Image (cartoon, grey):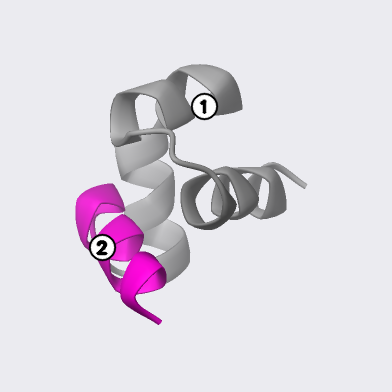
Amino acid sequence: MRRAHFTRLLHDTDLGIDATAARSGYALRRAVQRWYGTTPARLHRDGRSA
């Protein structure tokens, strides 16, 4: 559930990494590394260019 919420915020809004982390209420960097094997910034950048 948190993963889906975070991913939606990161890909579907203009929120930055810090705002996304604050809204998701989770240890974002650690979770993203575990979920996707990358950093939040790279996931954000890659998701926006897709």
Which secondary structure type mostly characterizes the magenta part of the structure? helix
Disc number at residue 26?
1
Quadrant housing the C terminus = bottom left
- Say which of marks 1 and 2 sits in front: 2
Instruction: Give the labeled residue for mark 2.
Output: 45
Does label 1 or label 2 sit earlier along the sequence?
1
Disc number at residue 48?
none
Q: Residue at x 47, y 63 (%)?
A: 35
> Residue 1 location in percent, x, y?
78, 47
- Residue type marked 1: Tyr
Q: Regarding mark 2 in the picture, which secondary structure is present there?
A: helix
Q: Answer whether residue 10 is magenta in the image.
A: no
Residue 25 seen anywhere in this rendered image of the structure: no
> Residue 31 location in percent, x, y?
43, 46
Q: Quadrant of residue 47?
A: bottom left
Q: Residue at x 63, y 52 (%)?
A: 8
Q: Residue at x 32, y 63 (%)?
A: 43
